[in-house]
Image (tube, helix red, strand yellow):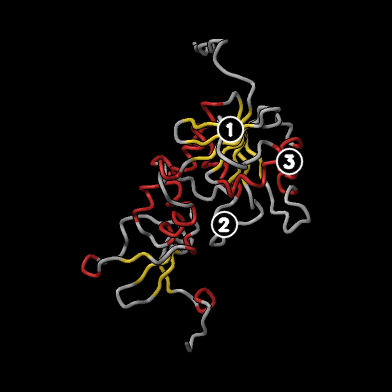
Amino acid sequence: MTRKPTPVDPRIGNNRVGLMITRGQVEHLGHAALKAQMMLDNGRNIIGFGSSQKSGVFDNPLTSDQKRRAQLGAWGDTFKMVFLQDIGATDRATDWGDYVFDRIRTNQLPEPTDFYAGSKHEARWYEHHFARLDGEPSYRRGAFEVWENPSTRKRIHILDRTLHVAISASEVRTLIERRDPAWRNYVPAKLWDFYEWEYPPELRAAVEIDPEEWMFPIERAYPVGTKLIDVDGTILILRDDGKWRPRTAAESGKSLGD
């Protein structure tokens, strides 16, 4: 028999709507802090994923589908998702924020009342929709400084990174690309295996194995396309048939004579 969900006390919740904008290429603990605060503050929340038309390159390795799966796997359906494309240089500083709000309306989602970011620099693009960031914050809540528009009651919440993990998304991506295991220190543990398999292997350094322990077949599985340094220095690539074969000239970007 299916159990009915326990009803939420009607005194818990509000009509506020949180918004966070991120490229979402790798979820790290700074993102998690923003999302956790949003989830606890607002009745509904929206995540906007930027640069969604880009993937498979160093600054934007993951596809929109991969970002969607990571989001759902980590947070379930807590957040509604909106996928945004770059709009390039425009004439007004307000154009990007206006575009974001237009996409939110197009997706038939409610208008946000609270914006969450990791820095003032990120939030400046949205001041005209929420609150001015001039002067001191209106107040502090935990690890967040909050600026509030007194007439609309809309707010911008900025995470004080000195009170949290001081690392950027680009630094986490660099650790992953170098195959430095320290990247796991900055990423939610439930996403470790996902990124290990989904991060484009062509963007990552070759796997290096101790020559004294080296023998085929490799016991550990890797995603197709993974590069590996053979004992003689040859770069091997894992092919679709599960076999390691030398990298071709086209893949290395060099001619055979180089």
Callout 3 touching callout 2 (CB < 8 Å): no
Residue at the extreme bottom: 257
Q: Would you name the residue on which mark 1 appears? A: 79
Whole-Å distance between the Cαs marked 3 and 2?
21 Å
Horizontal side of 193 relative to 200 (left or right) equals left
Q: Nearer the viewer, residue 137 or 240?
A: 137
Q: Would you name the residue on which mark 2 appears? A: 60
Amino acid tagged 2: Asn
Q: Residue at x 57, y 59 (%)?
A: 56
| Image position of 220 with respect to 8: above or below | below
Q: Residues within 10 Å of mark 1 (few under 14, many from 20)?
A: many
Q: Position of residue 34 (x, y in %)?
A: 51, 37
Q: Which mark is residue 174?
A: none
Q: Residues within 10 Å of mark 3 (few under 14, many from 20)?
A: some
Q: Residue at x 48, y 54 (%)?
A: 199
Callout 1 touching callout 2 (CB < 8 Å): no
Whole-Å distance between the Cαs marked 1 and 3?
16 Å
Q: Would you name the residue on which mark 3 appears? A: 103
Snapshot quadrant of residue 218? bottom left
Snapshot quadrant of residue 228? bottom left
Whole-Å distance between the Cαs marked 1 and 2?
22 Å
Q: Residue at x 40, y 62 (%)?
A: 178
Labels 1 and 3: the sequence-earlier one:
1
Q: Position of residue 60 (x, y in %)?
A: 57, 57
Question: Element under label 3?
Answer: helix
Question: Element under label 2?
Answer: loop
Snapshot quadrant of residue 250? bottom right
Residue at the extreme right: 91
Q: Nearer the viewer, residue 183 or 62?
A: 183
Q: Nearer the viewer, residue 198 or 40?
A: 40
